[in-house]
């Protein structure tokens, strides 16, 4: 069956900002409910056209009430970018190098995005600024970091009266960070410390710390809302990283698929937090590889194999049905 008529009906000529604006209005008007997240997917990273389209689309959406953009970059690194676009004094070169994971600060279009956000936010009240978020886990293809930073941040945030005594054991259990970051562990389970007695004890501690934070929410959130949300993010990350390291220590045949799905789960939790934080300010534009946006099983080449995983949790769990809308090419690259 020919798809020519269907493509003609949904296609738009985007010759200038006015035509893009009309396309955005048509898209939003066709939705039965307003999107909480409007997702633009790219079939591969590093192609200049997709981030540039994203930047143009963001400008249109900001005029229509959108107040944040969420990128496929480390959620914690992104805080530096958000501070800069809100008027922080960091050097932009430092922001691009350290505020983006995976080397994405060098991707064409990201410098322009950061500069536009800073200029747009200048002189505006915090409620009217466009915020920058990352939703990726702090992992790379070469491995995952030690959970030390996340666990330490929770301990630093908790007041003395709520600080559990077992936090005194954390440094001893963690050992050397180089044990956790050993690049050989990505493909050799025997090189990972993720299934050691110490690692299993740390997973219990991380879980208990998250419980402490949630049970003390009425007091902690009212005293320091921003600090509390950040501590919760560290608690999620500590648990996620320890699960990730445990999976690295596994010799199961689906080991790499499990690692990819654990990353997807961490991304989902980060995205849920963004939605909760931004729900009173307005919708968000989400930009990521298609593999992180589709509701179907995803796959990625690893060495000579193609690994599949089925975690599409943020698409299913973040929004009511219909609240997440995905634009772009549905074919995902194999890179």
Image (cartoon, helix red, strand yellow):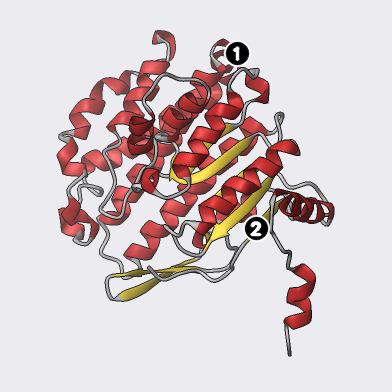
For residue 154, side relative to residue 201 (left or right) = right
At numbered mark 2, what does the secondary structure look like: helix, strand or loop? strand
Image quadrant containing the N terminus: bottom right
Provide the residue designation for mark 2: 326
Residue name at image x 45 percent, y 69 percent: 333
Marking on residue 271: none
Residue name at image x 50 percent, y 20 percent: 87
Please state which of residues 199 and 320 is positioned toward the viewer in this rendering: 320
Q: Position of residue 214 (x, y in %)?
A: 54, 26
For residue 8, what is the image quadrant? bottom right
For residue 198, what is the image quadrant? top left
Residue name at image x 49 percent, y 43 percent: 135
Provide the residue designation for mark 1: 222
At numbered mark 1, what does the secondary structure look like: helix, strand or loop? helix
Q: Dot 1: within a 10 Å radius of its alpha carbon, few (fewer than 14), some, or many (20 or more) residues?
A: few
For residue 167, what is the image quadrant? top left
For residue 201, side relative to residue 275 (left or right) = left
Q: Is residue 297 visible?
A: yes
Q: Which is more N-terminal, label 1 or label 2?
A: 1
Q: Position of residue 39 (x, y in %)?
A: 62, 52
Considering every residue shown, the one lying at the far front of the view is 15
Q: Can residue 211 be seen in this view?
A: no
Q: In this view, does 172 lie above or below 285?
A: above
Q: Is residue 128 above or below residue 253?
A: above
Q: Which of marks 2 and 1 is in front?
A: 2
> What is the CA distance from the residue labelled 2 to the residue labelled 1?
35 Å
Q: Position of residue 274 (x, y in %)?
A: 58, 36
Q: Dot 2: within a 10 Å radius of its alpha carbon, few (fewer than 14), some, or many (20 or more) residues?
A: some
Please state which of residues 78 and 309 is positioned toward the viewer in this rendering: 78
Image quadrant containing the C terminus: bottom left
Q: Where is residue 168 in the image (x, y as percent from the top left)?
A: 26, 20
């Amino acid at each position: 069956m020919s798809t020519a008529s269907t493509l003609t009906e949904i296609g738009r000529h985007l010759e200038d900002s006015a035509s893009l604006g009309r396309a955005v209005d048509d898209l939003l008007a066709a939705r039965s409910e307003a999107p909480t997240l409007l997702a633009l997917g790219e079939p591969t990273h590093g192609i200049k056209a997709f981030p540039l389209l994203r930047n143009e689309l963001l400008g249109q959406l900001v005029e229509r009430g959108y107040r944040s953009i969420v990128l496929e970059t480390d959620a914690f690194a992104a805080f530096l970018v958000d501070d800069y676009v809100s008027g922080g004094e960091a050097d932009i070169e430092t922001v691009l190098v350290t505020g983006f994971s995976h080397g994405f600060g060098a991707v064409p279009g990201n410098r322009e995005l950061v500069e536009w956000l800073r200029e747009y936010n200048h002189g505006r009240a915090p409620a009217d600024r466009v915020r920058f978020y990352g939703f990726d886990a702090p992992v790379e293809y070469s491995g995952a970091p030690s959970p030390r930073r996340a666990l330490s941040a929770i301990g630093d945030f908790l007041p003395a009266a709520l600080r559990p005594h077992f936090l005194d054991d954390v440094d001893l259990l963690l050992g050397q960070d180089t044990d956790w970051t050993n690049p050989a562990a990505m493909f050799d389970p025997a090189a990972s410390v993720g299934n050691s007695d110490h690692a299993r004890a740390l997973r219990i501690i991380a879980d208990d710390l998250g419980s402490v934070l949630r049970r003390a929410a009425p007091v902690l959130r009212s005293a320091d809302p921003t600090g509390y949300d950040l501590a919760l993010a560290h608690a999620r990350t500590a648990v996620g990283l320890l699960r990730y390291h445990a999976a690295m220590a596994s010799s199961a045949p689906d080991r790499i698929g499990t690692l990819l799905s654990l990353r997807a789960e961490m991304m989902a939790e980060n995205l849920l937090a963004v939605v909760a934080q931004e729900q009173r300010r307005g919708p968000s534009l989400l930009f990521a590889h298609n593999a992180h946006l589709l509701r179907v099983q995803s796959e990625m080449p690893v060495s000579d194999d193609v690994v599949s995983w089925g975690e599409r949790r943020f698409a299913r769990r973040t929004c009511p049905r219909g609240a997440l809308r995905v634009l772009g090419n549905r074919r995902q690259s194999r890179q």
